[in-house]
Image (tube, helix red, strand yellow):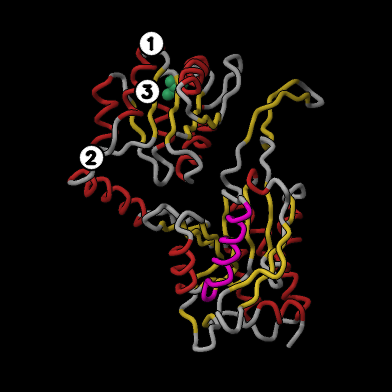
Amino acid sequence: MKIALGADHAGYGLKEEIKEHLASAGHDIIDCGTSSGDLSVDYPDCGFRAAETVASHKADLGILFCGTGIGMSITANKVAGIRAALCHDHFTAAMSRRHNNANVLAIGSRVTGSGLAKEIVDTWLNEEFEGGRHAFRVDKITAFEKDHASDAASATCSSNSAGGRTVVVEHPLVRHKLGLMRDKNTSSKDFRDLVQEVAGLMVYEITRHLSLEEIEIETPVAKTRVFTLSGKKLAIVPVLRAGLGMVEGILKLIPNAKVGHIGLYRDPETLLPVDYYCKLPKDISERDIFVVDPMLATGGSAAAAVAHIKGYGGKRIALVSLLSAPEGIARFHEEHPDVDIYTAAVDSHLNDHGYIVPGLGDAGDRLFGTK
Ligand code: RB5
């Protein structure tokens, strides 16, 4: 099982002990910090990071530690999709899984000794959600969370039953630029610039869960600890040809990402998508992959591209599309329920020619001036 761990300075020692305990039981650990018990850190920093790792399905479950466990449980419960339980004994730990489907366990290192903490963790991991009437109750929490999603949020998110999310990036700048892109009087040059800019702005949302680690540096004034990306390997894979228009905008912000390419055409006889070109980074199976295609219309080519990338070993994949049709989202998630979709807007429907309505026309033609 993949387990995210997080602690502040007070919980650090217990986190390290539990980490060893879990690793020796064969679990994969994603350590969201902190990395020392000597420096005081604020529990929300590591707490949010670990909780978001669970909420984004990068980890199956999370375990958080602070002095009392209270700060960590409050923090984690602010993250949509998280049900954090602060437990001091076996019974509450077991019930939090069976009845509440808790996906985060919080433990207070100043309350619970390490022997008991290990037992509580084992109990918690071995229990399963009972579903039934408890599922109705938990679903009510999820529904409330959805209904009360903050108006200030720059993204809204819905999930399919397998956990694959559709995240609509609704930042005002994205909406403004998308409006300009839709206008048929926007020139090819401006359209190209806008595609890059919107792709770049979407990077904030799609990289929200990248993990960080703390390192020590010296400012001109004093030594301090700062965060740095923890060497995550990323790949951008544009679906030819329109996907090419988004690459530079993303690379500006993630210059170390590798770029693969995939080109598909539809066989006129079988109507099945065939890849005529596919060149991916050699270590694609180790990378977080962003498949980029400005339009998710029928979903056919995006689904085929992702199927090919999976065939080459790709595992952690997200689809980034500027504009989507409900039909495309449904088809894509039917074939890839495990892959998140990031989009700047979901339009009304597809017309008889497979164009998104109201849409913005053919993104490839508008990018390259071929019409
Ligand atoms: C840190 O001293 C302490 O306040 C923190 O670890 C935690 O107990 C907060 O809830």
Residue marked by disc 2: 130
Q: Quote the CA–CA distance across marks 1 and 3.
A: 10 Å
Above/below status of 317 relative to 119: below
- Residue at x-position 35% and y-position 39%: 83
Residue marked by disc 1: 115
Mark sitting earlier along the chain (2/3): 3
Label 2 residue SS: loop
Tell me which amino acid carries mark 3.
Val
254 or 239: nearer the viewer: 239
Q: Residues within 10 Å of mark 2 (few under 14, many from 20)?
A: some
Label 3 residue SS: helix
User: Extreme left residue here?
Assistant: 133
315 or 57: nearer the viewer: 315
Mark sitting earlier along the chain (1/3): 1
- Residue at x-position 39% and y-position 17%: 118
- Residue at x-position 51% and y-position 14%: 13
Tell me which amino acid carries mark 1.
Gly
Tell me which amino acid carries mark 2.
Glu
Query: Left or right of 282: which side holds 319?
Result: left
Q: Report the magenta residues as a range.
A: 297-312
Q: Residues within 10 Å of mark 1 (few under 14, many from 20)?
A: few
Is 275 covered by the magenta stretch?
A: no
Q: Are marks 1 and 2 in contact (CB under 8 Å)?
A: no
Dividing the image into four quarters, tell me where ligand 1 lies.
top left
Query: Left or right of 175: which side holds 351?
Result: left
Where residue 100 sits in the image (x, y, percent)? 27, 38
Quarter occupied by the N terminus: top left
Q: To which quarter of the image does residue 241 belong?
A: bottom right
Residue marked by disc 3: 121
